[in-house]
Each structure stands twice: as structure tokens, then as C-alpha cells.
Image (tube, rainbow, N blue to C red):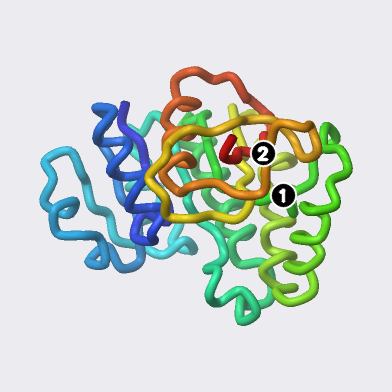
Amino acid sequence: MRVLILGATGGIGVLLVEEALGSGHTVVVYARSPEKLPESLQNHPQVVIRKGQLTDVEALSDALQGVDAVLSALGPAVNRGPLHPRGTPLAHAYSLVIRVMKERGITRLIALGTPSIKDPKDQFSLKMSAIITGVATFANTAYKDIVAIGETIRTEGDTLEWTIARVPILNNNSDKSYVAGYVGDGQTTTCLTRAAFTAFVLQELTAKEWIKAAPLITSP
């Protein structure tokens, strides 16, 4: 497949690019500062670099030409959570991405989310509730943007085959094992490795087990 990856220059985005290449896909990196990508990936024969803003319709449309699926690692930076800009900029970016995807006839979208995006299949979990409350309290603009991302994908992505991979607290362990379920189901936990997130995304890209669903992905 030819996949376009958003958020590719961040820590989890770089891992996603590497995982996609390891699965044999051609990767289009659409980024404001693609030079932040490691040189080994910039020079990889199966990586196509496209520079552009998430507000640039023309550049985004050009980057999406011939693409089979969009994989997104976009999300508020953890270390800038309290300083995340107002006005839900990431949700607005997703709105534009979805619009251009429709124009290009691209239907597959797998996006990063968090448990702040609630799902009807979630059950009560004291630990997860405390985490979400903490984010909503101390990083409110980031919280609002994440919630808005979920609403945007669910409403505007009505004709897409979307999956929102909701992740809890992330760490850099190398273990790729994961559990996919829902909050409070007795199987999911409150942590996940970044490597496991990328493994889920590439598995789901072809398996399509969670179409129009927002599973919680955690370590076992």
C-alpha cells in the first residue's frame, strides 16, 4: 500500500513510519518540518517527503494523490499539554484531511486518540477516570481538542472506514504486545508502549477489525 502518515516527525510518528516500511508499504510523509525526520528515513527509497501545513488544502491534496490510506499520529504534545493552543486546531486539521480524503476517494483512516474520547462500550474505571479528569483539569485545551477530534471523525467521516486507536499512558518500552478492547472491560490497562501502538495500526490497516470503532489499545 501507499500510506500517508501525519505526525511523522514526532516520537511515535517515527516509529509508525518504520513499522509501515517494515511491513512493505510506501510511506508519504506530510509534515511542516520534514527535516526533523531521521536522515535514514528521509533517504529511504520507499519514503516520499511532502512539505506542507495542515491548513494547506492544495499541498495536502497533492500529497494524498495515489494514497490508499491515512495513518495519523497527530496529538497534543505531552510536554506541552497545558500550553496547547485554544480553538481545537487538530480537530480542524482532521476536518480538512477528511474533506480532501473524500475528494481523492480515500476511505481508510486510522487515527491516534485517547480515552478522553468516550465510547458507548466503555465501562467505569476508577483509574482511567482519574487520568481523564487530570488531563481535563491540567491540560484543558489539549483535552478539548482530543474530544473534538473524536467528534469530527465520527460525524464528518461518515463515509470513511475510520478507526480511532485510543491510547492511555505511553512509554518507550520495546514490547509490541497489546490488548484491544474498551475502558473497564477487565482486560485493558492504563499503559501502552509506543511500539505496540504502531504494531496495532499496521495490523488494523489490513485486518479491518475495528471499522467505525474506537478501541482502547493497552499493554496486556
Who is closer to the viewer here, 199 or 76?
A: 199
Q: Locate the C terminus by quadrant.
A: top right
Whole-percent x and y of residue 12? 41, 53
Q: Which residue is mark 1?
A: 115
Q: Secondary structure at mark 1?
A: loop
Whole-percent x and y of residue 166? 63, 44
Q: Secondary structure at mark 2?
A: strand
> Quadrant location of residue 198?
top left
Who is closer to the viewer here, 189 or 211?
A: 189
76 vs 211: above or below: below
Side of 59 relative to 89 (left or right): left
97 vs 199: above or below: below
Amino acid type, callout 1: Pro
Residue 216: mark in rendering: 2
Amino acid type, callout 2: Leu
Q: Is residue 214 visible?
A: no
Q: Is residue 13 visible?
A: yes
Whole-percent x and y of residue 6? 42, 51
> Quadrant location of residue 34?
bottom left
Who is closer to the viewer here, 126 or 51?
A: 126
Side of 164 relative to 61 (left or right): right
Mark 1 near mark 2, Cβ–Cβ under 8 Å?
yes
The residue lying at 11 percent from left, 51 percent from top is: 43
